[in-house]
Image (cartoon, rainbow, N blue to C red):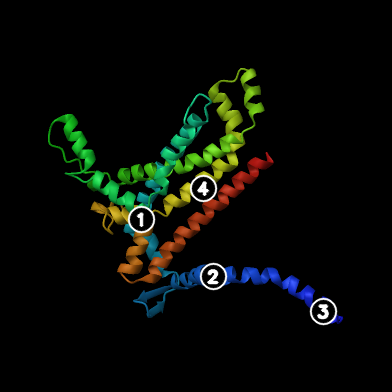
Amino acid sequence: MSAAQPMHNRVRASLAPYGLLLPFAVLFGLFTLYPLARSLVLAFQQTFGPEATRYVGLANFAALLKDSLFWVAVRNTVLYTLGSVLIQLPLAMILALALQSKGVRGKSFFRMLLFAPATVGVAYAAIMFGVMFEKQTGLINQLLQSVTGRGLDFPWQQEHVLWMLILASLWMFTGFNMIFFSAALANVREELVEASTLDGASAWQRFVHVIVPEIRPVAGFVVLMSVIGSLQLFELPYLILNNSGGPDNRGLTIITYLYQNGFENGDLGYASAVGWMLATVLILIAAAQRVIAARRSVA
């Protein structure tokens, strides 16, 4: 064996990890880094179709701040996020606590039943809820009509679009988040719960002072992902409202507004500005969550 052979083997061994990472790095660069960089460049341009562009600096962002329709989309998205998170996550926690109780039978069956909607495609859920909440012949209005005994055409899709979207998200994602909470509750130290019970703590006191601190990392993750997912709402309103913002733009969301500007109006620069405004907000929310989590862990 020549003296250069060991050196050659060491070089090959040191390069092997990079060779394994190369396919991921190429795909990540092509489909993540390049689109991000390209969209950042577009945010400072005005586009007229796929080829014609003109540099406008911060004009897109300035116009965005004055765009009343953009703020309608922001309001709708924020209301949807608040409604989904403030209703969905407490409900998911209640279900997880109920299925964690020792007296409940068939826990696996109920977990599977509640989680099942999360496996259904968004397109299917949008079609189903669109049919259920149709103004005149929808299932919900038919049931209300049978109960009241009179004609009824309650305008769900006209005046209560956001509530319809919130109900759809509750059906799809409550069981999904319940699984996270169930996994966190299963890791709560039993001796802490028993000690607090012996000390005379009520069920609420045990939940606030024992269970919540134990599941805080998982709960923080679930809250963060729910907020990010809600702010990126697109498929449900797009499909239910037939690619529109609904009557008086009551169902217009930020991503729907981005889509309309970029792919219908052809102004990819303005759409990129909308996207980067949303991305900045998401980054700030994630950073704030990290800071809060770090301070709590130190405390």
- Type of amino acid at the residue the image marks with label 3: Gln
Mark before the other along the chain sequence, 1 or 2:
2
Give the vertical position of 240 relative to 112 (above or below).
Answer: below
Is label 3 or label 4 in front? 3
Where is residue 296? Give x, y as percent: 64, 40
Identify which residue, 223 or 197, lies in the foreground. 197
Report if the CB atoms under discs 3 and 4 are less than 8 Å apart.
no
Where is residue 116? Give x, y as percent: 41, 43
User: What residue does disc 3 label?
Assistant: 5
Q: CA distance from mark 2 to mark 4?
A: 27 Å
Is label 2 or label 4 in front? 2
Helix, strand or loop for disc 2? helix
Is label 1 or label 3 in front? 3
Crowding around mark 1 (Cα neighbors within 10 Å: few <14, some 14 to 19, many 20+) is: some
Mark before the other along the chain sequence, 2 or 4:
2
Q: Which mark is residue 224?
A: 4
Helix, strand or loop for disc 1? helix
- Type of amino acid at the residue the image marks with label 2: Leu
Q: Is residue 36 left or right of residue 79?
A: right
Q: Which mark is residue 100?
A: none
Rendered residue at 45%/51% (across/down): 229
